[in-house]
Amino acid sequence: MAAFKSVLALFFFLLLISCSSGLHRGKRIRAHQPCKRLVFYFHDIIYNGKNAKNATAAIVGAPAWGNRTILAGQNHFGNLVVFDDPITLDNNLHSTPVGRAQGFYIYDKKDIFTAWLGFSFVFNSTQHRGSINFAGADPLMNKTRDISVIGGTGDFFMSRGVATLMTDAFEGEVYFRLRVDIKLYECW
Ligand SMILES: *[C@@H]1O[C@H](CO)[C@@H](O)[C@H](O)[C@H]1NC(C)=O
Ligand SMILES: *[C@@H]1O[C@H](CO)[C@@H](O)[C@H](O)[C@H]1NC(C)=O
Ligand SMILES: *[C@@H]1O[C@H](CO)[C@@H](O)[C@H](O)[C@H]1NC(C)=O
Ligand SMILES: *[C@@H]1O[C@H](CO)[C@@H](O)[C@H](O)[C@H]1NC(C)=O
């Protein structure tokens, strides 16, 4: 009888543990409160044949009907651009950069202006050290677009969340500036 009671007690104990951990996990998903929020800007100057000195981005892939100096017609479909852009805390291109946004975007739809982004924020300053990795569809005609924060390293170890992008400035096909509002829902 005593043995049965202790087995029963153990059973309820294990049940309690599994319930409480399940509850904890459920809570974390339900509570849409970021554990960390950061806002940055980054500045993209696309090489256009004349600005080699200042350009921070280059067209490295073009469809057969285009070239690597000018973005192709039909909403730039088929272009692949690689960038190494300065990140600033405000919207001024000439502010002291706090890191670099490094990666690529591809234009992947003929009939609307849209892109796919894969890049990292790389920080090596006294404020932040490490990286945040981003990926996702960027429908450029939307005022704001959400992409995924798929991970991080250093200060951002194992971070995950969502980044809301907004085109803060757009000058021809040479310069654009994105505002990135990072909301992390998993922080370590
Ligand atoms: C490069 O940047 C400097 C400083 O912002 C600017 O004065 C100059 O006109 C730019 N040059 C080109 C070719 O865009
Ligand atoms: C690239 O394509 C554009 C638009 O078709 C054209 O005006 C330009 O001359 C081309 N440049 C080169 C280097 O082929
Ligand atoms: C980061 O900065 C430190 C100190 O300035 C430097 O020693 C280190 O090489 C840098 N690391 C990277 C990955 O740039
Ligand atoms: C873009 O905007 C449309 C319409 O407002 C919305 O349904 C869609 O979710 C948005 N896409 C992204 C990726 O934000």
Image: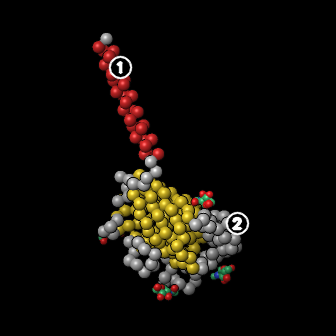
Res 107 seen here: no
Q: Secondary structure at mark 1?
A: helix
Q: Is residue 144 above or below residue 52?
A: above
How far from the left and from the top, in percent, is residue 2? 29, 14
Disc 1 residue crowd, few under 14, some 14–19, many 20+, Cα 10 Å:
few
Q: Secondary structure at mark 2?
A: loop
- Quarter holding the N terminus? top left
- Whether the residues at callouts 1 and 2 have beta carbons within 8 Å, the answer is no
Counting residues from the start of the chain, the first of labels 1 and 2 encountered is 1
How far from the left and from the top, in percent, is residue 28? 43, 45
Q: Is residue 59 left or right of residue 112?
A: left
- Tell me the number on the disc at residue 8: 1
State the colouring used for the structure image: secondary structure
Q: Is residue 61 left or right of residue 87?
A: right
Q: Which residue is mark 2?
A: 111
Quarter of the figure with residue 169: bottom right
Q: Is residue 78 above or below residue 36?
A: below
Res 181 seen here: yes
Q: Is residue 44 above or below residue 114?
A: below
Query: Looking at numbered disc 2 in the image, what kind of residue is underneath it?
Result: Asp
How far is disc 1 from disc 2 in space, using C-alphas? 65 Å
Viewer-closest of 144 and 110: 144
How far from the left and from the top, in percent, is residue 24? 40, 40
Query: Looking at numbered disc 1 in the image, what kind of residue is underneath it?
Result: Leu
At x 49%, y 69%, the residue is 179
At x 58%, y 83%, the residue is 49
At x 45%, y 58%, the residue is 183
- Tell me the number on the disc at residue 123: none
Mark 1 or 2: in front is 1
Q: Is residue 6 left or right of residue 84?
A: left
